Amino acid sequence: MDNQVLITIIILILISVLFFFAYINSKRIPVRKKERIFEKLEEISMQVKSSEVFARRDAIIKLDNLLGKAFNIRYGNDNSCGDNLKLAKKLFDKNLYQKLWDVHKIRNEIVHKDRDISSSETEELYHIYKLGIKRVLK
């Protein structure tokens, strides 16, 4: 084989490796964005424990918005939480995916049908949202 052909092949392989690493790094979620999401999640955890039903309802709405923001960061889009949840089926096991849809539906009932929510249910929903957000930002 000619030296020029060998050098050309090596250069093409190196360029391919460079593009591969650039692609991999472009998919990483910036640490600072993750930290902000988890800080907000921690703030909401205090609101979840409130004895006021309106505070708990607001906490669920905020959690859904936070999950939506995590999806927006992950996918680099401005889609709604529900639209991104449809895209995210591969991120979750079947059980967690269904639970995330269920909590999203409860959020919609809170917003559109003025649904009340108990303390224990609020804490359960918080844990599901927390699992979902952690998985999205992994």
Image (spheres, rainbow, N blue to C red):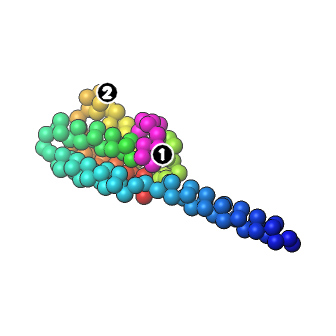
Q: Magenta stretch: dominant SS?
A: helix
119 displayed left or right of 101? left
Q: Which amino acid, mark 1? A: Tyr
**Circle 1 sits in a helix, a strand or a loop, which is it?**
helix
9 displayed left or right of 131? right
Q: Does any portion of residue 102 appear in the rendered image?
A: no
Q: Which residue is mark 1?
A: 75
**Foreground of the two, 111 or 74:** 74
Q: Which amino acid, mark 2? A: His
Q: Earlier in the sequence, mark 2 or mark 1?
A: 1
8 displayed left or right of 35? right
Q: Report the mark closest to the observer, 2 or 1.
A: 1
112 to 5, vertically: above or below: above
The part of the image, by quadrant, that contains residue 53 is: top left
Q: Residues within 10 Å of mark 2 (few under 14, many from 20)?
A: few
107 to 95, vertically: above or below: above
Q: Which mark is residue 37?
A: none
Q: Which residue is mark 2?
A: 112
The verdict on residue 78 being magenta is yes
**Quadrant the C terminus occupies:** bottom left
Q: Which residues are magenta?
A: 71-83
**Quadrant the N terminus occupies:** bottom right
Which residue appears farthest toward the left when viewing the image?
Answer: 51
- Is the Cβ of the residue at disc 2 closer than 8 Å to that at disc 1? no
Q: Residues within 10 Å of mark 1 (few under 14, many from 20)?
A: some
